[in-house]
Amino acid sequence: MAGVNRLCVLHNRYRSKKTTLFGNKLVTFNECKQLSRYAQKWAEHMASQDRLVKSSLDTIYDLGYSKAGEIVIEGPKDGNELMSIISSSYMYRRNLYNSSFDSIGCGFATSRTGKRYWCCCYGKKS
């Protein structure tokens, strides 16, 4: 779990290098226990199914968030590799650099066949 907790630090390191359209710094993500629990459960769900599955963002909205996003990825061996994939993909970067998000939660699980599943959830409280 230490690697998962480190993902918030890694996300913020990437965000600190970017600015908004108006030249303002992006806010630092707060690691949210609620989002982390949800992301961990979803990573475990994917591992138990041994397949990559998007979750319903409605669940994140139900936790009290007015904005929500998610990244699910299969494969990276560690957080650094995961962040490299996120930062090099336009679709994933949209969540990483979205100025509407101020909270993050991440989860990781390994399937019985050894596949690694990652889930990063992003949100903004109402």
Image (cartoon, rainbow, N blue to C red):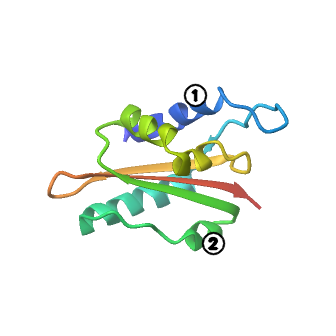
Looking at the image, which is closer to me, 126 or 22? 22
Residue 47, relative to residue 105: is it above or below? below
What residue is drawn where x is 46% and y is 38%? 5
Q: Quadrant of residue 69?
A: bottom right
Check disc 2 and give the amino acid type: Asp
Instruction: State left or right for residue 52 relative to residue 4.
Output: left
Q: Count the marks: how many?
A: 2
Left or right, residue 51 beside residue 60: left
Residue sitting nearer the eye, 106 or 84: 84
Percent across and percent down for residue 53 are 38, 67
The structure residue drawn at horizontal position 59% and vertical position 73%, both measured from the top left corner, is 58
Q: Residue furthest right?
A: 22
Secondary structure under the numbered disc 2 in the rendered image: helix
Give yes or no for contact between labels 2 and 1 (Cβ–Cβ under 8 Å).
no
With 115 as the anchor, is 84 left or right in this view?
right
In the rendered image, the quadrant that contains the N terminus is top left
Which quadrant would the C terminus be assigned to in this image? bottom right
Residue 22 on image: x %, y %: 85, 36
Q: How crowded is mark 1: few (under 14 residues within 10 Å), some or many (20 or more)?
A: few
Tell me what residue is drawn at x 82 percent, y 31 percent.
23
Return the residue at label 1. 13
